[in-house]
Image (cartoon, helix red, strand yellow):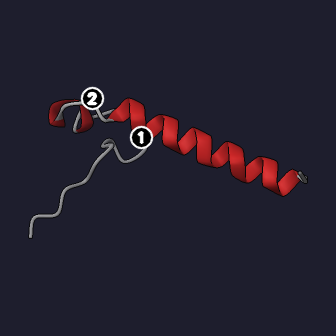
Amino acid sequence: MDLLDRLLAHDHWATARLLDLSRGLTDAQLDQPFDIGTGRCAQRSST
């Protein structure tokens, strides 16, 4: 296994872990403002 394979495997694991953990969050939790970044975890389309 070369370095790129290890990095891609870690990226896949980390992304899957974050998605699993975020499944239990409510809409209110996802829309909670923060003092950093854009302030929202999820942006919903108005269409």
Q: Earlier in the sequence, mark 1 or mark 2?
A: 1
* Badge 1 element: helix
Q: Which quarter of the rendering shows the C terminus?
A: bottom left
- Residue with the mark numbered 2: 24
Q: Is residue 41 above or below residue 45?
A: above
Where is residue 28 shown, x and y percent of the image?
16, 32
Where is residue 29 shown, x and y percent of the image?
23, 30
Q: Residue at x 28, y 48 (%)?
A: 42
Residue type of the residue flagged with mark 1: Leu
Q: From the viewer's side, name the closer residue of 1 and 37.
A: 1
Q: State left or right for residue 3 relative to residue 21.
A: right
Q: Residue at x 58, y 39 (%)?
A: 14
Q: From the viewer's side, name the closer residue of 34 and 43.
A: 43
Direction front: furthest residue: 1
Q: Residue at x 60, y 48 (%)?
A: 12
Q: State left or right for residue 41 relative to residue 46.
A: right
Direction right: furthest residue: 2
Q: Is residue 4 above or below residue 38?
A: below
- Residue with the mark numbered 1: 19
Q: Residue at x 26, y 30 (%)?
A: 25
